[in-house]
Amino acid sequence: MKLYKLVVLGDRDTGKTYDPTIEDSYKKIAVIDDQPCVIEILDTAGQEEYTALRDQWIQSGDGFLLVYSISSRSTFDRVERYRDQISRIKGTDNVPLMLVGNNCHIITGREVSRDEGMDLARKFNCEFIESSGKTCVNVERAFYGVVRMIRLRHEKNRSSRAINCINKIRNQIFSCN
């Protein structure tokens, strides 16, 4: 079964974890689009003192979920820092990434509008979803969405390699004439 390593990044107090830890890892067997897989979820601590560890987790990750709380402007404002860290470590902005506005179950006290989340996702060129870990709204959808992005990226890379191979063969054939 194919293994997908997903890294969850965001400040503490975003609701991304129930128990604040330095690192927590979960594995789940799932069937996504009729294809079985193992999803390893690495939930990182948001504390600044764990930046070096976070670098290692990002390096090994296949896809990323950037999480902020819709009830905390400061967590939203710091999301770009995590995005920059991913881009720096991966050496590209083109990574499977989902921006997640968490705590959508909160009726009053919203500090970040849905439109602001969507605008930031456009800026990052990534998908956006609002979720609630407390009520399990869109949580699975967010993770499965990142797995689909990873699969799509692998398919595109495979197609590009096949086209390059065909072009090399074609060039060799025509250069012999």
Image: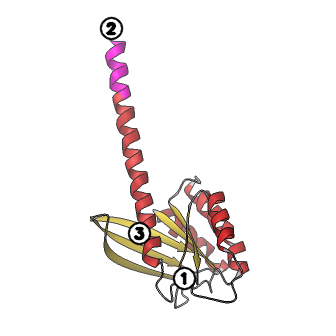
Q: The magenta stretch spans which residues? A: 167-176
Which element type, helix, strand or loop, lies under badge 3?
helix
Q: Is residue 58 left or right of residue 124?
A: left
- The quarter of the picture where residue 176 lies is top left
The answer to whether 118 is drawn above or below residue 160 in the figure is below
User: Which residue is nearer to you in this view: 25 or 152?
Assistant: 152
How many neighbours does mark 2 have within 10 angstroms: few (below 14), some (14-19), or many (20 or more)? few
- The quarter of the picture where residue 36 lies is bottom left
Q: Residue, x 68% and y 78% (percent of image)?
A: 75
Residue that carries the numbered disc 2 in the rendered image: 177
| x, y percent for residue 114 | 64, 73
User: Which residue is nearer to you in this view: 100 or 106?
Assistant: 106
- Magenta stretch, main secondary structure, is helix
Q: Is residue 82 left or right of residue 25?
A: right
How many neighbours does mark 3 have within 10 angstroms: few (below 14), some (14-19), or many (20 or more)? some
Q: Marks 1 and 3, how far apart in space? A: 16 Å
Which mark is first along the chain, 2 or 3?
A: 3
Residue that carries the numbered disc 1 in the rendered image: 16
Q: Residue, x 37% and y 71% (percent of image)?
A: 39
Which mark is first along the chain, 1 or 2?
A: 1
Whether residue 174 is in magenta: the answer is yes
| x, y percent for residue 101 | 60, 76
> Residue flagged by tag 1: what amino acid is it?
Lys
| x, y percent for residue 157 | 41, 46
Residue that carries the numbered disc 3 in the rendered image: 144
The answer to whether 11 is drawn above or below residue 62 in the figure is below
Whether residue 94 is in magenta: the answer is no
> Residue flagged by tag 2: what amino acid is it?
Asn
> Residue flagged by tag 3: what amino acid is it?
Tyr
| x, y percent for residue 147 | 41, 64
Q: In this view, does 109 lie to the left or right of 150?
A: right
The answer to whether 54 is drawn above or below residue 93 in the figure is below
